[in-house]
Structure formats: C-alpha cells, structure tokens
Image (cartoon, helix red, strand yellow):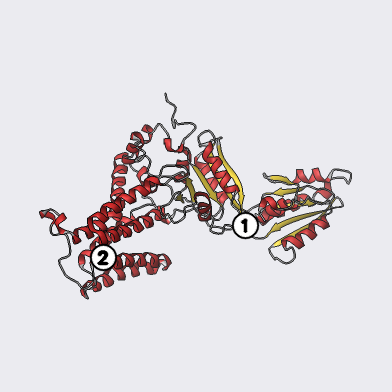
Amino acid sequence: MTQKQEEKWPIPESVHEVENYMKQRVGLGVSFDFGVRKLQILKKEVQIYYVNGLCDTRFIIELIEELVQINDHEKLSTDVFKIIENRLVNQSVDKAETLDLVVTQVLSGLIAVVVEGYSTAFIVDVRSYPGRSPQEPDTEKVVRGARDGFVENIILNTALTRRRIRDERLRFEMHKVGVRSKTDVALGYIEDVADPDLLNILRKELSEINIDGIPMADKTLEEFIVKQGINPYPLVRYTERADVAAAHILEGHVVIYCDTSPSVIITPTTYFHHVQHAEEFRESPAMGTFVRWTRFLGVLTSIFMLPLWLLFVLEPSLLPQKLAFIGPNEQTNIPIIIQLFLADFGIEFLRIAAIHTPTPLSTAMGLIAAVLIGQIAISVGLFVPEVILYVAVAGIGTFTTPSYELSVANKIARMILMLLVAFFHTPGFIIGTTLFLILLVNMRALNTPYLWPFLPFEPKGFLQIIFRRAIPGAVLRPSIVHPRNRYRQPPNG
C-alpha cells in the first residue's frame, strides 16, 4: 500500500479513542520508546505523545511546566485550545487534522499535543537526533579550507548550507519517501536560478518511489532517479562537503539531501564534475590549474597505461627505437596478461581490506603488502618487476580520482581494454577505446550530455574545465544546468 493509498483518519474528539488508536496501530504500551504523558488542564485531559531518543527531554519538560501553570492562572470558562496554543513556547508549532499525520510526525521526532474535545492536534518540533558533530570528510580532505562536513542529520546539513547561502530565494523542499520509513528527503536549490524542468523531473521521480523504506538512503534514491542499470559510470555526484554543495547550488544545480546520510547528491553532473576537487579552488588559479592537470593525467593513466604497456609487450614493433627498452626483460611461465590481472586484483584486495581494517592496523598491513608480498612475488617468479611497477602507477592514478565511483568505473573500463588488447592486439585497443568513448558520449544524466563541454563541444565551458579560472572572471553560470539567471555577477558590476 502506497502513501497515497493510506486512509486518512480524522482525529477524534475523545482522547481515549486517540490512545486506543496509538495502542493498536503504533505500539503504545509495547514499544518502550513510544510514550504518552497525560495532563489535566482546566478539567480537560491533554495527552502528549513522543518517542524517546528522538526528542530533547528538556524542551518537553519546559512545555509541560507551561501547560501545568495554566491551571493556576486561567479560568475554567476560557477556551482551553487557544490557551494551550499560546502556551506552547516553541518556535515551530503546527496543527494536524489526521491521525496519520500525527503518527508520522511523532515517529519523526516531534511531539503531538492532543486536547480532549478538539479534533486538531498541535505538532511541536523538539527533535534532537542522535549523531556526530560536523567534521572534515575523510574522502574529501583539503590542505586549506573548511573542516566542517555533512552528518547524518538532515536538519544540520541544510543549516550548514544555509549558513553559506543567505539568500531569501534558497529553498529546501521537503518530501517523504518510503511507505514505512517515511524518510525525509529535501531538494535544495535557488528558486530564480535552478532549472524548473529539472525540478519537475526530480519531484516526479521522488513521488513515484514506491518502496517500504530506504535504509541505504541516498544510494537508493539514486537508483530510483537515474535508473543506471549495469552502467558502471556514476550519473550523479556525491559530496560530504558543505562548501562544495553550496558552490553547486549557486551554479544552478539541484542538491538532494537525505536524512540519515552524510552525503548529498548533486544533479545534474557530467564526467568532468567527477574529476574536480575543492582543493583546486582553495589555491591560486595557476596552482589550481596545475593540480587539475595532474589529476587529469592520473585519471588517464588509470585507464590507458596498462592496456598500452600490454600492447607494446605484445607488439614491440610499435615502439620507436629509443623506447625499445619498454617491456619485460625476464621470461616467466605466467602470461603477462594473467600477471596484470593478478596484480590489479591484488591492489583491489588491499583496498577493500584497508576499508575493513582498523586504522592502527591498516598502515602496518599496507607496508607488509607493499614490501613483503610484492618483493616475494617477484623473487619466486610470479611477477616480473615491470608488472608491479605499471600496476602500481595505474593504481596510484586510480586513487587520484576524487570520485570513488568514477575510479572503480575507470578500473572496469581498463580491465575490459586489457582483455581486448590481449585477444586482438592493436585492433582491440583501437576498437575498445572507440567503443569506450561512444559509451560516454551516448550517456545522459537527467537529460545532460555526460561528456559536456567536450562533446557537444562548447569552447567557453571547455576552457573552464582545462583551466581553473579566477572567481572574478567566472561571470556566467555553466549553461549545461540551464540556469534561469545565467549571471553569477551583475553584467555591469
């Protein structure tokens, strides 16, 4: 049953009927963390429903103190409902007309105040989600820059963005996703900048998600929104940095915030969005350009170095005389292609093991793997030294890719190219590279060409990709996001 199919039960005037509903449908009296506090206010019973662990107890106590004092200062003839509404000392007090909405809000960490004789409940925001404080993300560290990053609390994440963009047109449009989980999902954008068509697409995709819950949070949203299938290349970009998210919102992107996730989704994105890093914009334009070129070189190395080296090993005649030394100088019983795959998978084993190894042990494990395993494998004749060298360089190129998802996708492309070279030599490399480019050219992320501004070619956008321009010179927003207002700065200012 979807959210739209749920019955909307009006709130009965009898608080005992409300209590029975909570017992039968929500688990009041069974779930230890779901509770109710009953008060007598001017001879009317008032019930306060809450969930332990999601609410700030101090705020609830303050509210109860204010409500109890009504008995000492007000007459029985007064309107209890209006008096209670005025005594709810909180900046966020809403009204609910249905039991379904009351339950959803209470299970989200708010409290519901039900008054006997009235079919409307007060919803008070006293949320205090358990979580950690903002800190720099491990995967997006910078030498110089902000050290705060997103956490698992959507309220805190939107606040970190709002702190950087104090524009009255900044919007955080809230949605509920998941029939059972009812997870908070927010679309962050600037109203007079973001593309309305993109917003309508995202709203439509979110409204059509029909699933029990999204415990995997943003990743589940991505799979519903972009429908990636078996394509390994990422069609959206993730970031845990609040400054990166704010910068993309100002460019005209729409950012998707999902509660319980420390990452946000940036849409739309191209291939080149995944190879940029905040470090480039924390240095001078010349230094940022140098870092960017170095990163581009690392990405190209991670894809093409091993297939090219394998091609030169299989066809030494392709090498000029001065580069004839490239290739193994020793003969082994194991084919080179098998050695390359064994070494490549070995690095992948180490990467996965490092993720699951406690930090104090991961350094020691890396040293053991690099020094002992590599050296012993060469000594026993399992690998030739050149294989270890080139696989290590390609692995380093993989780690220079800022996007983890893109680095893994590039590794898959590299392995496929290696197989084509092993079977078909030069034609395999040419055909494989051509098919690889055709795949990227034909990809579209939310109606956005994946290789823009390279294909389709846009000179100004391409220059901004190649060179890190100074911020004062970046007057226009990227055209690929179809911004309603193209100027980042006034044309004459």
Element type at mark 1: loop
- Lateral position of residue 448 relative to residue 421, left or right: right
Q: Residues within 10 Å of mark 2 (few under 14, many from 20)?
A: some
Residue 106 image offset from top left, x and y in percent:
69, 54
- What residue lies at 71% left-to-right and 50% top-to-bottom? 101
Q: Nearer the viewer, residue 491 or 453?
A: 453
Residue where numbered disc 1 is placed: 181
Element type at mark 2: helix
Q: Quadrant of the C terminus?
A: top left
Residue where numbered disc 2 is placed: 337
- What residue lies at 17% left-to-right and 65% top-to-bottom? 328
Q: Nearer the viewer, mark 2 or mark 1?
A: 2
What's the amino acid at mark 2? Ile
In the displayed structure, 191 sits above or below 354; it is above
Q: Nearer the viewer, residue 63 or 201?
A: 201
Q: Is residue 161 visible?
A: yes
